Every structure is written in structure tokens, then in C-alpha cells.
Image (cartoon, rainbow, N blue to C red):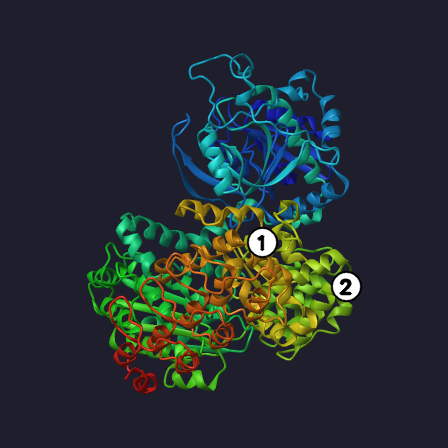
Amino acid sequence: MLSNGDYTVGWICAITAELVAARAFFDEQHEQPREVTQNDNNNYVLGKIGPHNVVIAVLPQGECGPSSAATVARDMLHSFPNIRIGLMVGVGGGAPSPKHDIRLGDIVVSSRGDGNGGVLQYDYGKTIQNSSFVETGFLNQPPQSLLTAVNTLEATYEMQGHQLDSDVEMALKNIKRRKKYCRPHASTDRLFRPSFTHPQNSFATCSQVCSDDLTHLLTRTARDEDENNPMIHYGLIASASTLMEDAIIRDTLAAERNVLCFEREAAGLMNHFPCLVIRGICHYSDTHKNEDWEGFAAMMAAAYAKDLLRQIPPKKLEAETRIGELLSDVLNKLSTTEANVETVTSRLKRQEDFEILNWLTPFDYGPQHSDFLKRRQQGTGNWLLDSPNFQTWLNTDKQTLFCPGIPGAGKTILTSVVIDHLGSRFPKGSNVGIAYLYCNFRRQHEQTIEHFLASLLKQLVQELSSIPEGVKRLYDHHMHKFTRPSCTELSETLLSVLSDSKIYTRTFIIIDAVDECSKLVGCQKQLLSEVFRLRKGTRTNLFATSRFSDEIAERFDGAQCMKIHATEGDLATYLNEQMKQQPDVFDRDIRDDAVSKIVAAADGMFLLAQLHMNTLIGLPTKGDVKNALRNLAKGQDGLDETYKLAMQRIEGQGVGYRDLAIKILSWIVQAVRPLSTLELRHALAVRPSTNRLDHDFIPAVGILQSVCTGLVTVDEESEVIRLVHYTTQEYFERTWLTWFPDAHKDLAIVCVTYLSFDIFESGVCQTDDELKRRYQEYPLFDYAAMYWAYHAEKLLDSPLEVVDFLECKTKVRASGQVIMDHNSEFRWHKLSSQITGLHLAAYFGVEKAIVQLLLAKDGVDINATNDEGWTPLLYAVSNRNEEIVQLLLANDGVDINAKDGDGWSPLLWAARHGDVVVARLLLSKDGIDVEPEDNDGKTPLSHAAMRGHEEIVELLKPRAI
């Protein structure tokens, strides 16, 4: 007889039908356990599926819900301490939508993506139509081996189809009273319109009181023969303590959160028993419950679970951390973060305070920090915390600790360790302020000096019980004028907060990667000047990291300095943990040799060790590993060679995977800003010359990383997919013409194809909620609208797709609304109202597209105006784009004196900006009005004089006399 320690898979069911279905799929059934821990009230069913020993527990009769599920899971882990993976298998309610054709008998598998962990917890009040719900968070992830198995099985089903219906037929032979578990007739699968509810207080079935009138039913076409039936869906499962019976809320969550299924138990498990949730659909989460499908849905879910377990090799399972240990480790790591989150949440109850904080800056470094901290290998970095220099900095006021290091040394992860240590050392209520910045080369366009100061101010203020009066005054002064505070105003307000001993007795400011702060317009220099000023005038300590740079080092002259490097001990700890994932390849002898050689090759660079490890883990045999160890690239010079080898591995993949990897890298490297995983997945799904998005082409999140051979990573908290390191970006900035020379063309075409989808034919959204839904349903819409022109402008010729997009007025206006939404200034100009493609091309400065539009067979109205009277020429002048101004002025039909709604002509705009070149171009045209007056009676000369534009004054003065 097996001992409790021999069971590695925990399987939880909520109802009897689910337990019957699970037992039917056992390959072997074992005896009851001889003993369980004290106070364990569970009853267990033990057996074997494939090579795995499985323990099944069911919730007590009539006690469904998250708290009961949590209790069962807790007791199971105590009695069976060696459980490595968990499954929650049973029935649930479907959330059919235009995106997801979910039907009774289908299966929904919890899958992370779109910024979530696979299970959404929410609070749900009443159980009748039109009640309300409150989202309370996304829950923990299942173990990695389960996620990998899901991807593998999904690919198998895509290629070969599934045999789950046949598996169910075989398993039914194990059930004596099997009628309840057979597939019901298709006519009983009825989906009612959301507005039509089952009569309240009626005990009659839907077939008796609801089905006579076919107008209440939604018509669905039969599934094709080449489709899996039942189908397996992968995505978000919503969980609450109360049954979902509201079709309106069901459809809202399906549209806004992409929810596929509703159930009641997973919310109690995911943070106590991280597991995969598998649900067979037995009703549609409305008032029309359908018990006919319960047994069959349970059988389908169990069939999938069995097939899934077959995909996991026993050694892979053994390499997983025991769930009990994992939970203990996670709780210890994140206790400080959770305490801080709780503090922030409790102190921001007042809507006014939240609005002020969000106005300071909507950006939050918290998710980034959490992502970095999770990447720390447990036990590494303690050498820094224990060092005399760090302890002196920690315990003495007004100290600066500067930590330079080579690229890839682990500076950012160590910064997150320092921040986490400070949070533990100075918990809430200690009157010690902590604020931090992670500088990022990909965010230089948004990480201005104003952004940095506003972020520091926000972090310090949000920890307080109330917003300081100085911050409120700053908000009141600017908010209603749609203006932003200057650097000086933010600095003075920040200084006033730090100087008030009633607010903070000490403050710590941490800045990571100073070298990645932009040098344009002196941002880097200003940031250091400001924090040095704060440190000098208040009890503030500063911690900063950077690459080695003489210029930056000079700014820290006189400060304590510690060089950052990856110690041999930390590298060995990391490498040994990674090699445990493949014990069959990395046995004791080869592991010691590999650690020794990688540590030597890394030469203090965590990044290089990680890249080498990624390469070795992908090798199938010990011999391949030994060969690779003989040729490890070394030190900083080895990074380029390592990246080159990674690209060669990509090119050696099958055509489909190779092309996908090149597309992924093209987007990540050349995109103007970092992309979320959902944005990138939509971009990759766009196909040429299509008018809608085919969701079948959206790749799974897991494949985005796997095909790129370790060059990209996903920050799960911030939902961003990025290159693994700054040096990777630098490598591709030098070599992208070798690896993906058509990147900008490809990105431009994808953007305008996306913007040309039929769904945007409706044009401008009429409400903020409608626009919000558009962003949610089409996540690439924002990026495509803002940056298609950036990519198009880098091409020698504008692709036909660009011109086709610009010739569609309604889609152009839909795109223009995004620009208006990004910039409050353009709310005054109503950019999206009545604009044409020529307006948009002139605004962005896409010269080649303008030429093609002007030469078009049907022509364009070069003087077209929007509701505020803006012409393409006015946009070009106001944006100070001299080339576009010159191009438009070359057209004889252009109106050089056209005025916008405020009475501003092109010359008035040029005078206001002090743009001498544009002013000369305008004055060279016959018919120019030199003294036009705006609605306030001011002329170009008076505007130039008021703003001190002396050259413009000298240019206009002789003509104005």
C-alpha cells in the first residue's frame, strides 16, 4: 500500500457528480489512506492516472463556496504533504459572447493572460437580475508544469483534434447509473436573450415556461465538422461566493474582462492551493438553470484533466516545489508588499484624494517593483544588505550610497531587494517615507523631470492619512485650467512635504538605472540636482544605481560608493535552482561542472549567466550540454555573441515559429513604447488585407517567450512584454537591419490594417464608456492610432494600406479620437470631429502620405476644416513641421489665411511659437494677411512682442506699417 507521501496530484471537486466523474477516469483505484492529520475532516478517494498518484477530495454536502473549498484544500495539504500540483475540476456556468462561442458541454480552462492570473475574484451581491458586483482581484498562478502541459495539449488538439468524447464513452462503462452522465440531446442546449429571465418563484422548468416563444432564444449556427465539439476554451474564470444568475452582468464581465466562465470555489483555492481550474459548462450563468447537462459537463472536465495529467512527465512533477512549501515562501516574500497595499487601499477611501493622486501621475512603479522582486533568486543579494557601507547608509541621516556596475550585473534586482528591505524595516506607522524610481530607456519619452518629481510626491503622499494642504493647493491651481505643474512647483511642494517633521521624520529615495534617464533637455542632470537638493535640505537618504559613467560618477563625488557585481555565491545559487528543473540532464557531476564554467564565463554578470542557462536548459542530452559548456562566450564581450547565437537558434526553428519570433522581436524592439502582452498578441494576430480580427490567430502568452529563446520576458504584474535587458535593446539597435530589416514597414501596415477594421466604421465614440469599451475590446487600437505614422514616416514610400486608411473618413475620425483622449489640449480643438486623412497626415507629418493624397485621382480638399475650423495647414504650422508646411504651401489652392475657431491664422500660430522659418515661408506667399486679428483682437506682431520673439518682431514690423 502506498503512503500519503506518494501522492503528488491534488484534485478537488465541489459536488457528488464531479466526484463520480473523476473516479470514472481512474486507471487504478487505491485503498483509503491509513491515517490523516488530526482535525482533517475530508474523505479521500485515491487512485492513479497515467504515471501519477492522485488524491481526490469533495466538499461537504451542501457547503459549496470559497471558504469550504479553502478548508478542504488546507486539510488535504496537511495530510498529503508531497502534493506538487492541484486541480479544481467540475462544472460551471458559461459566458458566451461574440468572441467566444461557448456551449453546454464545452470545457473552460483557467489560463493566465490579458494581465490576469486565470481566476478573477469578485464580490457579487444579490442573485437576481440587475444586481451589482465588485472586482476584488486576480488570484494566484498554478504551477509551471501545469501551464506548460496546457500549452502542449492545446497545440495537440489544434493539430489532431481531441478524443474527449470517446474517452467519456469509455469512462461511462465504469458508472452503473450512467444516464445522468451521458450527453443530453442538442435541443436542450438553449441560450436565452439576456433581458429575458425565468419567472421568479417558479419551480417549473425552462422547457415548461420559457421555451415556447422562440423570440426569447438566441439563434446559433451548428458547429462545423472540422471544429472540436465540445470545444475547449482557455481564459479567465470568474469566482465568487454566490452563484452567478444575472445575464446582464455576465455579458458585462465577458465584454470588459473577457470572462469565459463563472463558478464558486476557485476563489477559495488559488491563494491557498494554487491550481488549474477546469470547468465543464452546464448552464449559461443566468436564471435558466439546466441540470440536464451537469453530469455530462462533469465528465468532460474530468476527461480533459486526465488527458492533461498524461502530458506531465513524473520527473517534471518531482521538480515542482511542494505546494505547502511554495505558499509559505510566497507569503514570507510578499508580506511587506501586501501590508503596503493594504495601507494604501485603506487610506485612499475618499474619492477626492484618489483624484488628486491620479492627477499627480497615473503611473505606478509598484507593479514593476513587484515583477523585479519576484525575479530575485531566494537567498541572493544579502551581501549588499549585510555590508558595512549599506548599514551605515541605512542608519545615518542624509547619506548617499551610489552603486555603479557593469551591464547585466543585477543592479535592478538588487534595487528591488533594497526597497523591499526598507519596507520591512520601516513598516506603516513608522513615519519614514520611502519612494523609488525605476528609470527605463524605453520610457524616456514619458519619464520627464516633471514625471519623476510627481511620482516621488505621489508615493510619499499616498502613504498619509490625508493629503497635505500644499498638494491640494497645487491641484486646485491647475486642475480646472487643464494645466500641469512646472518642475519648480513640484520640487517646492515635494520639499514642503519632506521638511515637515510631523509628516516624515526620515525619507529614503531610491533611483535605479540613472544612466537610462534621458539626457535630452537635461532630464538626467535635473533629476540628480533635485534629489541632491532634497537630501541636503531634509532628512533624506539617497540610493542610486547606474552603469559605470564618469559623468554620473562626478555627480556622486564624495558619496559612499559600492560596486555592484554578481557574486560567485549568488550565481551558484541561481544556477543550481535552475538546473533542478531538469534533473535527468543535470545530474550532480555535470551540475558542478556547469556551475563552475558558467560562473567563470559570466565574470560578475547575472545576465550572461541567465542567457547561458537558457541555452543549456533547451538542450536535450548531457552530451549537448557538455559541448555547449566548452564554448561559452565570456564577459561583457560575450553578450553580443550570446545574442547572435540566440538569433541563430530562432532562425533554426520551424518556419512558423521562426517567423513568429521575428515578428515578436520586431514589435518589441521598434515599438515607440513598451507593449502589454495583450497589445502584442493582437498585433501578431493581424493578417494582411483583412477587415476584422480573427481571434484564432491570437497566440498564447507562453509561446511569446518560448519561441524567442530567452530574449524576451513578461512582467506579469505590469503586463508588459519586453526584452530581457537593456543590453539586448542596444544589440538590436545595432543589428536590427540584419535580423528584421522590414520591421517599420510591417508595423506600419499592421497598425493601419487594425485601424481599418470594419468595427471602426462607426467613427467617433459618443461617450467615455463607449471609448473605454473600444480600448478594452481592441487593445492595439491605442498604439496603432498614436504611432502608425511614426513607423510610416521611416519608409521610402507610404504603403497602399496607409493611403487606403487615410481615405476612409469615419475610421480616420475614430483614430483621431485617441489623440484627443491622450492630450487634454486637443479636447479644445476636437481633433476627431470632421477631420480628414489629410488633417491626420499633416498633424503627424507623414510627408509621403500627403503627396499621395494630393495626387489621388479624386483629389482631396486641402482646405477641409473640422468643427473648430482647423485646416491641415493649421495643424502643420501649430506642430512646427516646416517640411509639411512647405509641401502644403506648394499647392496653389491652399488657404494661407484660414482661421480656427479662436481666430488664429497660420501666421498667428507661427508668431506665437517664434517659428522664424515657417513665418518666412508664409510671408513669401502672395495674398498673405500680415495683420490678421484673433478673437481677442491681437495680431501676429503683438503676440510675438508679448512672448519676446525678437526675430519675428523684426520680420513683421516693416510689413505691418
Say which of 287 and 806 sits in front.
Answer: 806
Q: Is residue 485 left or right of residue 326?
A: left
Q: Is residue 577 left or right of residue 901?
A: right
Instruction: Identify residue for label 2.
Output: 652
Quarter containing the N terminus: top right
How far apart, in angstroms, are the residues tagged by discs 1 and 2?
Answer: 30 Å
Residue 47 rendering spot, x and y as whole percentages: 68, 31
- Give residue 754's mark: 1
Q: Is residue 263 above or below residue 922?
A: above
When asked about the image quadrant of residue 19, the answer is: top right
Identity of the residue furthest to the right in this view = 623
Task: Say the numbered circle drawn on residue 433.
Answer: none
Residue drawn 75% across the image and 25% down it: 170
Looking at marks 1 and 2 on the same chain, the residue that comes earlier in the sequence is marked by: 2
Quarter assignment of residue 16: top right
Q: Residues within 10 Å of mark 2 (few under 14, many from 20)?
A: few
Residue 621 occupies which quadrant of the picture? bottom right
- Residue 12 location (% of width, % of height): 57, 33
Mark 1 or mark 2, which is nearer to you? 1
Q: Is residue 68 above or below residue 416?
A: above
**Front residue (pair 914, 634):** 914
Three-letter residue code for mark 1:
Tyr
Residue in view at x 70 percent, y 55 percent: 583
**Amino acid on which the number 2 mark rests in the picture:** Gly
Quadrant of the rendering where the C terminus is positioned: bottom left
Please tell me which residue is depicted at 38% across the width and 34% down the height of the picture: 132
The image shows residue 824 at horizontal and vertical percentages of 36, 60
